Structures are given as structure tokens and as C-alpha cells.
Image (cartoon, rainbow, N blue to C red):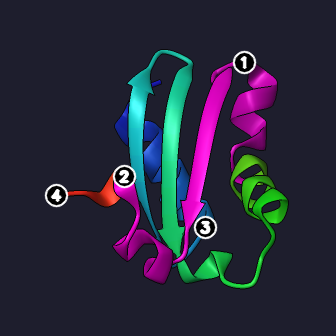
Amino acid sequence: MQPNEVKALLESRIGGCEFHIQGEGCNFQVIAVGEAFEGLSPVKRQQLVYSALSDEIASGALHAISIKTFTPAQWSSAPENAQ
């Protein structure tokens, strides 16, 4: 899979989020930013993203996924968002 394919899958399955994807093959780093994470524990945030990709993980199309999640307020001061 390519990063743009992973991004398209996530955008179609989790509304109102912005995704930043890096990686190649079956190993990707996902940064997800959105209101959907407001009020959720870190574990619940991870589960939301993993569940959106469960079919691809089960098929082996995706193997290793690193996920970081942020609300828009958190993202505004996140080191990953440094410009």
C-alpha cells in the first residue's frame, strides 16, 4: 500500500479528521487530528483508528502501524506540528 491509499481509507471511515501518513509497503506511521478524539482515552483513540483499518490489518496489507492521535487543540502545540 501507499501512504495516499491509507489516508483515503481513513478519511472514508473516520469523518472530520485530518491524517498525516508516512511509510511504505505494509509499515506506516499515522498521525490523526480531529474532534473525534475529544474526551477519549489514549487507548480508545488508538482503537478507533485500528478499527478503521481492521480489514487491511487482517488481510496483511497493513502490518506495522504506529498511531499518534491529537485533538485540534493538542495538535496546535504538538512537536510533530512544528513548522
Number of the front mark, 4 or 1 = 4
- Amino acid, disc 2: Glu
Q: Which mark is residue 80?
A: 2
Mark 3 and mark 1 in contact (Cβ < 8 Å)? Answer: no
Q: Are marks 2 and 4 in contact (CB under 8 Å)?
A: no
- Check disc 4: other Cα within 10 Å, few if <14, some if 14-19, many if 20+: few
Toward the viewer: 39 or 51? 39
Foreground label between 4 and 3: 4
Residue 14 image label: 3
**With respect to residue 2, does 32 lie above or below?**
below
- Indicate which disc, 4 or 1, sits on the residue closer to the N terminus: 1
Residue under numbered circle 4: 83
Kind of residue indicated by mark 4: Gln
- Looking at the figure, which quarter contains the C terminus? bottom left
| Residue 25 x, y percent position in the rendering | 48, 15
Q: Left or right: where does residue 16 sit relative to residue 46? A: left
Residue 68: where, in percent of width, then height?
A: 57, 51
Q: Position of residue 42 (x, y in %)?
A: 76, 61
Cα separation, mark 2 vs mark 1, equals 28 Å
Q: Earlier in the sequence, mark 4 or mark 3?
A: 3
Relative to residue 41, is residue 56 depicted above or below?
above
Amino acid tagged 1: Gly
Residue wearing tag 1: 60
Q: Is residue 82 inside the magenta stretch? A: no
Q: Is residue 74 magenta?
A: yes
Mark with earlier residue (2, 1)? 1
Q: Please give the range of residues in magenta.
A: 52-79
